[in-house]
Image (spheres, helix red, strand yellow):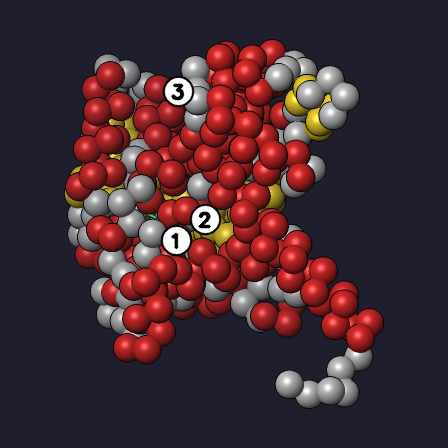
Amino acid sequence: MTTDLNTEKLSAFGKKIGSILNGAAAALMISVGHKVRLFDVMSDIGACSSVKLADSAELDERYVREWLGAMTTAGIVSYDALRDLYSLPKEHAAMLTRSAGPRNQSLYMQYIPLLAQVEDQIVEHFKSGGGVPYSEYTTFHAVMAEASAARFDNLLIQTVLPLVPDIGKHLESGINVADVGCGSGHAVNVMAQNFPNSTFTGIDFSSEAIGVARNEAEQLGLGNVEFLEQDAADLQLKEAFDFITTFDAVHDQAQPRQMVAGIFASLKPGGYWLCADLCASSHLGENLDHPIGTFGYTVSCMHCMSVSLAYDGEGLGAMWGAQKAREIFTDAGFSLEEVARVDGDAGNNYYLCRRPL
Ligand SMILES: C[S@@+](CC[C@H](N)C(=O)[O-])C[C@H]1O[C@@H](n2cnc3c(N)ncnc32)[C@H](O)[C@@H]1O
């Protein structure tokens, strides 16, 4: 070890490393707290002892007390040491409970344990190249579906669709719509419920996700949806759709350019493709202040890039960025009319692409 170290810098970095370790641990505990509904219960019952919280949440008190220790030292839960009472400030509840909808950040903490599941495999791929296929991420579709449902339920109809000129009018009168890489299909089902005169097709290559999508459509009694289990790199649906959507479904494709070409060919001339994908620059130097940059590159390395490489793909990665997106979309023939942001969805750009007439 060198002896000419700047002690001030050393001490500052030591604090930073400590806070990274604490932050990572807190993320895991927030994920657990979300899964066992501790934030929701704390928000409902107000200041409480660990016994009351455990009783109310129907959980084991010893585990709840240790969790409270982690959450208190992380500054998430407030602790009155004199009365031995814990409380969740309402501003924290507004970002951690199910009723927070798309603001609920605990949904995203679940990605940390999800990624950790494949850590050993990722380590091997650092040496050998290639990637980890979707099938190895056993909780991916459930976690993704829960996080995106919070956005779709609150923002899709009211805020996202109106980004597309006149789309409400067309959906009311009846058009054909596809959602490519639809995952568990909630966006498709929400749109189909709201616009009964239009028909909706969800496309995904995951049989697990398509099964969930079909079940939900059946439970909702929807007659205007179908779900196709199909590779998006091989869309053979010539000019079948008036409008196409993709939600976080381009960057992890093995063959994103083939997928975008297929979307172009499947749209009627003049039709719009609304593509939501992670908001970032394609240049690392422009992402230094990205509010969730480390998270974005980590999810990318341990999932989005890796699943693409697993199928001999391009490995764009989650942080592919707006410049690369523009290049791929315009190369396919689209005109990129707008890159919009949506209040309540800080993570995504909404690319409004049009197939020229
Ligand atoms: C990040 S998830 C997004 C899912 C959904 N749109 C949402 O927002 O919840 C990406 C989806 O793309 C699907 N996918 C990836 N590669 C695909 C391919 N080649 N063909 C069809 N679907 C694919 C995955 O199965 C996954 O459901």
Frontmost of labels 3 and 1 is 1
Q: Amino acid at mark 2?
A: Ile
Check disc 3 and report the residue beneath it: 194
In the rendered image, residue 90, in percent from the top left (x then y), is placed at 69, 22
Which structural element holds mark 3? helix
Q: Residue at (28%, 77%) from the top-left corner?
A: 128
- The tag earlier along the polypeptide, 3 or 1, is 1
3D distance between C-alphas at marks 2 and 1: 6 Å
Left/right of residue 235 with respect to residue 99 in the rendered view: left
* Quarter holding residue 212: top left
Q: Nearer the viewer, residue 211 or 326?
A: 211
3D distance between C-alphas at marks 3 and 1: 38 Å
Q: Nearer the viewer, residue 262 or 24?
A: 24
**Residue 237 vertical placement versus 171 (above, below):** below
Which structural element holds mark 2? helix
**Residue 184 vertical placement versus 27 (above, below):** above
Residue 235 seen in render? no
Q: Say the numbered circle drawn on residue 141.
A: none
Residue 139 seen in render? yes
3D distance between C-alphas at marks 2 and 3: 34 Å
Quadrant where the image shows the N terminus: bottom right
- The tag earlier along the polypeptide, 2 or 3, is 2
Check disc 1 and report the residue beneath it: 116
Check disc 2 and report the residue beneath it: 112
